[in-house]
Image (cartoon, helix red, strand yellow):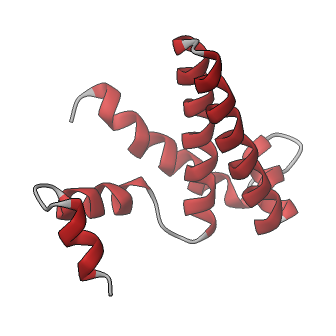
Amino acid sequence: MTDKQDILLRLGATIAARKGAGTADSYVAGLFAKGEDAILRKVLEEAAEVLLASKEGDKLHVVREAADLWFHTLVLLAWHGVGPEDVLAELQRREGVSGVAEKASRK
C-alpha cells in the first residue's frame, strides 16, 4: 500500500487505541466516553456537511468535509470493534461484482 492508502489503517489503529485514553487529552476518547449516540450524531452531522459542501460546488470544501466524515466513520467502526481493514476487505470482496448482483446476494 502507498502511504496515502496506509493512512486509513494507521488512523484506524490510533483511534482504536484512544478508546481507553483520558478524555482531557483526546477528542476521540471524549467521543467514546459520550457513547454511541454522540458518535452517531457526529457521523450524521459530517454527512450533512459533505452534502452541503457538494451543493456549494467548492471541491476543497467537499474534500475537507469528506475527511471529517471518514474520520468520524472510523470512530464509529472502532466503537463496534472493527476497523478500516474490515471495510477494505469487504470492498475487495465486492470488486468486479456488479452492484445489482451484490445487492441481490444480500437477500
Residue furthest bottom in the image:
107
> Measuring 71% from the left and 51% from the top, which residue is drawn there?
44
Q: Residue 104, image x and y in percent?
A: 26, 78
Answer with left or right where residue 24 lies relative to residue 29: right
Closer to us: 61 or 38? 61
In percent of width and height, residue 101 lies at 18, 71
The residue positioned farthest toward the left in the image shown: 96
The image shows residue 55, relative to residue 81, as above or below, that is above
- Residue at image position (63%, 66%) is 79
Q: In which quadrant of the rendered image does the C terminus lie?
A: bottom left
- Total marks shown come to 0
Q: Residue at x 73, y 59 (%)?
A: 40
Question: From the viewer's perspective, is 46 left or right of 15?
Answer: right
Where's residue 78, x and y in %?
A: 57, 61
| Image side of residue 94 versus residue 40, left or right | left
Query: Would you place residue 80 above or below residue 2 in this image?
Result: below
The answer to which of 71 and 106 lies nearer the viewer is 106
Residue 54, x across and y down, in percent: 58, 25
In the depicted structure, whether residue 94 falls above or below residue 28: below
Q: Residue at x 24, y 81 (%)?
A: 105
Asked where in the image residue 7 lies, by quadrant, the reply is: top left
Quarter of the image with the N terminus is top left
- Quadrant in the picture for residue 93: bottom left
